[in-house]
Amino acid sequence: MPIADHIKQLTNKRLRILWIVLGALLLVSVTPLWLYHRQVIGMSEQKLQDTERVQQSEITRSLASETLEFEQNLSEQLLSQRQVLALTGWITDVDDTAHAPQLARLLQSFVENNQNILYVTAVNKQARGQSAGSFRADSDPFVQVALKHAFTASIQGLNFVSEPFALGEGSRPALIVSVPLSSSGQFTGMLASVVSIDGLLARIRDASVRDRVVFIVDGHGHIVAHPDTREMVPGRDVSINSPVVNHLRELPQELRTTETMRFFVPGPDKKHPVEMIGTYSTIPELRWAVIAQRSLDEARIDAGVHELTAQALRFVVGVTIF
């Protein structure tokens, strides 16, 4: 073999060995960096989920407390008006023409002093009486049905809170709150009001930020209030599309609890479902629940996890090139 060919073979072997050594050195230097990056990402992911869980729990508990307080205040105001009717003696027959003008003024004053009440009516046991408010209850079939249910509950001596329904073209969430009227232990009628929950809706919208959605459902999985009033109108059943709501339907109605879940929902690409984190807080007195949910991917973007990964990749590529 010529000396030149022999030298060339030795040179090629040395180059191959050199490339192997360089590759091993590169692997040894880059692998710890990548493993460290994965560990940091894992810790960041866990911290992100813990933070989101805490925030959702605080939001849902706070809104659940505000919602219950809202309903209790309304019931107390109706009870106060019932006491006035009892003191004046009008409670025996609220349809008596002798005190009809005074009762009408009392009801009108009650509506004017409470921005959440759109309409109030006091009826006797024949369902006749006085009413006040800017809202025309007799022109809305949903309100009429709810008032009939309220009257039936009043006959049984029960306070009543209806299922939510939508009012008007804007689908404003509303419900009926009523208390029975009685004199000497005998049923004499009902005092009922159509209540707007726009105040709760405003709080829900304030809490629905950074791609987090907060809403209220009843025990049947129907929307009570949702920031998207066009698509998610009051009364719409969302138990099929929401694993959190579906899980709520299986719980005892009297259970007071707060729980966080991770679940998947269909995404734009059917092959890649969206990973979600959601929390609910129940309101057993109303048989409602406040729900907050958010895409984990959106939470990662907001926390800068994707940017951290991109920076790590750029660093590894830079080290490799160097």
Image: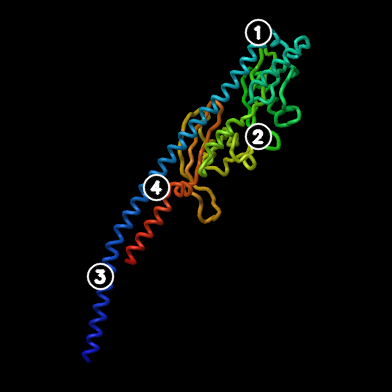
Q: Residue at x 31, y 54 (%)?
A: 36
Tell me the crowding category of disc 3: few under 14, some 14 to 19, or many 20 or more residues within 10 angstroms, Cα based: few
261 w.r.t. 318: above or below: above
Q: Residue at x 67, y 34 (%)?
A: 166
Residue 48: image quadrant is top left
Q: Secondary structure at mark 2?
A: strand
Q: Which residue is mark 3?
A: 21
Q: Residue at x 72, y 18 (%)?
A: 123
Q: Is residue 42 left or right of residue 67?
A: left
**As shown in the figure, which amino acid type bears the numbered disc 4?**
Glu
Q: Which residue is mark 4?
A: 45
Find the distance from the CA under tag 1 to the CA under tag 4: 63 Å
- Horizontal and vertical percent position of residue 267: 54, 52
Find the distance from the CA under tag 3 to the CA under tag 1: 99 Å
**As shown in the figure, which amino acid type bears the numbered disc 2?**
Arg
**As shown in the figure, which amino acid type bears the numbered disc 3?**
Val
Find the distance from the CA under tag 2 to the CA under tag 1: 35 Å
Disc assigned to residue 87: 1
Q: Which residue is mark 2?
A: 172
| Residue toward you, 240 or 262 | 262
Mark closer to the chain start, 4 or 2: 4
